[in-house]
Image (cartoon, grey):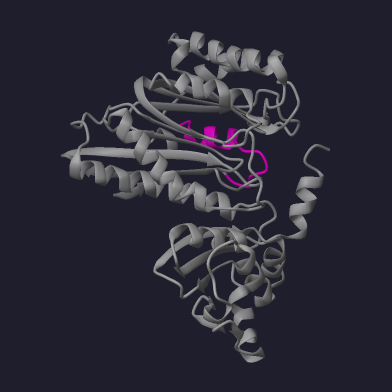
Amino acid sequence: MKEIQGGITAPKGFLASGIYAGIKRNKKLDLAMIASERDAVAAGLFTVNRVKAAPVILTQRQMKRGNARAIVVNSGNANACTGRQGMIDAKEMVELTASALSIDKKGVCVASTGVIGEPLPMARIRPSIEIGVKGLSAEGGRDAAAAIMTTDTFPKEIAVRGRIGGRMVTVGGIAKGSGMIYPKMATMLAFISSDAAIDRDNLTRMLKKAVDRSFNKITVDGDTSTNDMVLCLANGMAENKSLTGKTLGQFEKMLEHVCAALARMIAKDGEGATKLVEIRVRGAKNVRDAEKVAFAVANSNLVKTALFACDPNWGRLMAAIGYAGAYVREEDISITFDHINLVKNGIGLGKDVEKRVVEVMRNREYAITIDLNAGSAGTNVLTTDLSYDYVKINVAYRS
């Protein structure tokens, strides 16, 4: 397996485009199209927020079929909390895309991201869908990645290729996400393509596992969006034998690599973030406890502001560990920044050690390891600091 260029269109038979449809006021790309040259096995995961955007509800219905051919995505408007009209508009986006591609509308998925509570400007979207379809190409992945962005500062795409069962198989993907990033999943959209031949049950199982290990292990601000979804389409154009046994494992590694890379890009691009910090919990009684501690620390505003200030205020970490709801004993806890042990047996190791930790915290990326010494379970979570710019970005989001 090796990383290659091309993103979502790197696998055989996938085309994409990204255009400006007049949704965003800043005139940046805001409408993306992704299409397979033939029907693809499809799997999807969606936000657990009980307030779901119309395109999420509609695409969940579409996915029951188990196959898909195309995805239409707009940014700049979430089409969430828009009542009956929101569903009418989402359905029209699907129908217009299907008509322009001359395919069954049941094979089209729709996604939206942006401001909540505003109706879609369908008068501008209608003619743009046909333009987007006409612009589909094998080189359009980068534009599609840019067209799904909101507060993101860079497009997020990756592709990997490897030999499976005597055939070259490719997995590619694009994603967006910068704020409202918290499982399960985040204000994120991720679209993954592959030319592998694989049955739907295995694809669904592997996608869930990959998402749990990647997109569900990042947090920027503790909020869960109304529009999150991850879709994966596999069209079989690599002409491999349907994956089984060892070959399934090989494909699973490729899928997890793509999801993990996209998740890391999202965390790194967190709104206003200056630090990307991996919270590693070790020695927990069970995985559930490990996750409770990791996310309590990763989501603590007091911890996150300390990360921004490069302040080794380990008391804030201890407080978050203590209220996480996991089994912990204060006198057993150890905290390490990269390779510098700051807390041992629940007690800080002094100002001289703190000075060394400050140097670690000045790095753009580093790890904090929390050993609970209560068992053998562990987990890793990616988080960011909380800066002045996070407030500025969100104050100005609608103005």
Q: Where is residue 9 drawn, in percent x and y?
A: 41, 33
Q: Residue at x 48, y 61 (%)?
A: 380
Q: Residue at x 62, y 74 (%)?
A: 361
Q: Residue at x 16, y 39 (%)?
A: 166
Q: Is residue 247 visible?
A: yes
Residue range in magenta is: 139-154
Residue 144 within the magenta-colored segment of the rendering: yes
The quadrant in which residue 348 appears is bottom right
**Residue at far right of view:** 399
Q: Where is residue 224 drawn, in percent x and y?
A: 63, 42
150 or 66: nearer the eye?
66
Q: Is residue 6 visible?
A: no
Pick the quarter of the image with the C terminus: top right
Q: Residue at x 53, y 32 (%)?
A: 144
Count of picture labels: 0
> In the rendered image of this protein, does residue 45 appear above or below residue 211?
above
Q: Where is residue 111 drawn, in percent x and y?
A: 57, 27
Q: Answer with left or right where residue 2 lies relative to residue 370.
A: left
Residue 287 within the magenta-colored segment of the rendering: no
268 or 44: nearer the eye?
44
The quadrant in which residue 386 appears is bottom right
**Residue at far left of view:** 166
Q: Answer with left or right where residue 179 lies relative to residue 143.
A: right
